Amino acid sequence: MRGLATAPAPADLESHDAHGVLSHMLERYHPRLALACSFQKEEAVLIDMLLKLEPAARVFTIDTGALFPETYQAWRDLENHYGIRVEVFDAQDPAGVPWTASHCCSVRKVAALDSALDELDAWITGLRREQAATRADARKLEFDARRGVWKANPLADWTDHAVWDYIARHNVPYNSLHDRGYASIGCSPCTLPGSGREGRWADSDKVECGLHLDA
C-alpha cells in the first residue's frame, strides 16, 4: 500500500503545460516523487524545470554499466551545473555477463526501476507522444497499476523542436550524442544513430526495453 498513490486520480492534467504538471506533482507527492533520468535531452529539460520549482527535488537513474562515455559525461555535466547528486540504481549483471544486444536489458532494467519506485508514490518521465507509436497515447498523468504509483509525462505533447528551443533559451547542458544523429540514446551495444527511436535495438523488432510497458 502506497498511501496517496492508491487514491483516485488527483486531476486531469491534459490541459496543463509542463510547468503546471510538475507543480501539481510536487505539491501532491514531493518528497516521494522522483524524475527518472536517462540523460537524454528531454530529461535535461525536466531537470531544469523541476529544480527551478523545487531545488530539493529527487532525480534517479538506472546505470547499466554500458552507457556511452558521452552519457556519463552528460551525467557529470548536469550534476555539476545544477549542484545535485543523481540517485543511482544498478542494473549491471551480478554475474558480470557483458551487456550486448543479445544479452539485453529488459529484466535487469525493469528490476532496477522497480527498486527505484519502491519507496515512491509517483515518478516523472521524459516520454513524448511523437517519439514512437508505442507512446502515441501517453497521457500527462497515468496510473502505473503494476507498480501502484502515478506516472507523470509533462512533455507528452512536446515536439522535438520545442525541446531544443527550451534547451537553447535556458542554456541547458545536454548529451552531445544528440549532435551526432542519436535522437534516442540507450546503451552503447544496442544504440545507433537514427531519428525518433529507430536507432534503438536496430535490426530487431524490439521497440521498448520494458520500463514504459504495462505488465
Image: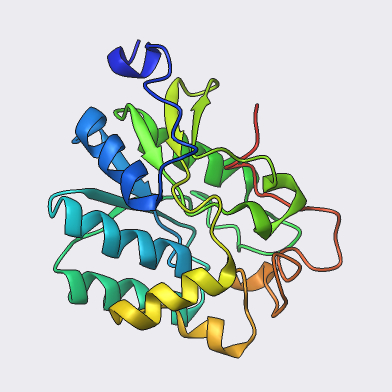
Residue 164 at what x, y percent from top left? 48, 77
Q: Going 70% across and 46% down the picture, which residue do you hit?
A: 136
Q: Going 60% across and 89% down the picture, which residue do you hit?
A: 180
Residue 163 at what x, y percent from top left? 48, 70
Q: Going 45% across and 77% down the picture, which residue do you hit?
A: 165
Number of labelled discs? 0
Does residue 175 appear to the left or right of 203 in the view shown? left
Quadrant of the image occupied by residue 211: top right
Residue 62 at what x, y percent from top left? 43, 53
The colour mode here is rainbow
Examine the rendering and report whether any part of residue 72 can be seen: no
Residue 169 at what x, y percent from top left? 34, 80
Q: Nearer the viewer, residue 1 or 11?
A: 11
User: Eyeballing the image, is 46 above or below 57?
Assistant: below
Quadrant of the image occupied by residue 21: top left
Quadrant of the image occupied by residue 26: top left
Quarter placement of the C terminus: top right
User: Eyeballing the image, is 149 above or below 159?
Assistant: above
Q: Going 39% across and 73% down the picture, which residue do you hit?
A: 166
Quarter placement of the N terminus: top left
Q: Nearer the viewer, residue 105 or 160?
A: 160
Q: Residue furthest bottom?
A: 180
Does residue 143 appear to the left or right of 189 in the view shown? left
Does residue 22 appear to the left or right of 52 in the view shown? right
Q: Nearer the viewer, residue 201 or 20?
A: 20
Examine the rendering and report whether any part of residue 124 can be seen: yes
